[in-house]
Image (cartoon, grey):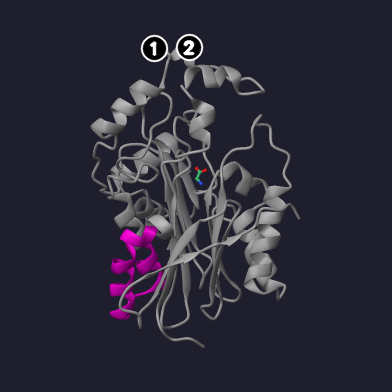
Amino acid sequence: MNTAGIVVGSFNARVGLPAAIAILRAGGSALDAAVAAVREVEDDLSDRGVGTGGLPNILGQVELDASLMDGQTLASGAVGALKGYPHPIDVARKVMELTPHVMLVGDGADLFARLHGFEPAPLLTSDVEEYWRQTITASRVEDMTLYDRRGERYAGVVRDWTTLLHQEIFGTTNVIARDGQGNIACAVSTSGWGFKWPGRLGDSPIIGAGNYADNRYGAAACTGRGELAIRVALAYNVVRSLREGRPLDHALRAGLGEVNALPDNLEKRAGSMNIVAMGRDGQVAAASNVPDSHYVYQTTDMDTLEVRPRLYVPDAL
Ligand code: GLY
């Protein structure tokens, strides 16, 4: 068994890896390390897909989703569409630790955060607010109640929606950590699909879709267009393959192959899907259905993190 601490995550998690590695070096748990790394990304104002500075929904409200899972016990916690609290990953952890529930969403999640001592803070930064104003064409809520099968009416409200879909509006961060005791944990956080419908949840708060960890087999966590991950239970899909004894890269190819085979009701297929994964002994791999995608990796024995290319999986299973 590898006894060094190990952390793997999406490319934007690089700002959080030093915090995770410091915790693991001090003998801290995988769960503490994964949460600490994600919290750093939530505070990164330049990241428009996570935490403070994240893109809002069509009404200009930043709604945050997060979840975490402890691979030793399979304990899990999640929040969805949380408004006004900058560290949804900490609120998700409290849900896991204090309640008999796994997931709280919307007003109930806000209330839980308030009553359990979390400090509210503004999440919509001035530059993102300006970007939202330039992007939304409707001035009245009534004009925003627009969906049709081809997405054309929605595209009429969100300026250049189709272009945005292919660029920058699916940000998320995820981190999987393994500590010296061999425990594995994962944590995920996102502001979700930029200019989303209020209340829309992606894969990030859904255990089994956005993340999954089980010490006995390994862990996986996803970023990208969450609807696709939900439909194939992508994180569990990968861990299930590991449980069946497949090597990591096979598990990743199989999971993304299922995503790539999904019928898609967006006229032009949009949105990447990416996975990071860890085997039970700490081996890591990552994959994406878009080329030139990267992830980050570090062990407690390494001085600095490594940026590594993901396996490119363009094909349907
Ligand atoms: N993967 C994040 C989301 O779809 O909301």
Above or below: residue 186 compared with residue 28? above
Residue 175 in view here: no
Residue occupying the point 29% across, 26% down:
130
Above or below: residue 269 compared with residue 272? above
Q: Which residues are the magenta region?
A: 13-36
Residue 214 or residue 19, whichever sits in front: 19
Q: Which residue is mark 2?
A: 143
Disc ID at residue 115: none
Residue 105 coordinates in the image, percent (x, y): 46, 40
Q: Which residue is mark 1?
A: 139
Magenta stretch contains residue 272 = no
Looking at the magenta stretch, what is its main secondary structure?
Answer: helix
Residue 5 coordinates in the image, percent (x, y): 40, 79
Q: Horizontally, is 170 left or right of 129 in the view?
A: right
At label 1, which amino acid type do we have?
Ser
Residue 234 coordinates in the image, percent (x, y): 63, 55
SS at circle 2: helix
Residue occupying the point 69% across, 48% down:
260
At label 2, which amino acid type do we have?
Asp
Residue occupying the point 27% across, 50% down:
43
SS at circle 1: loop
Q: Residue furthest front?
A: 292
| Figure quadrant of the C terminus | bottom right
Whether pointer 2 and pointer 1 mark residues with C-beta atoms closer than 8 Å, the reply is yes
Q: Horizontally, is 89 left or right of 224 in the view?
A: left
Residue 310 placement: quadrant:
bottom right
Residue 241 or residue 95, whichever sits in front: 241
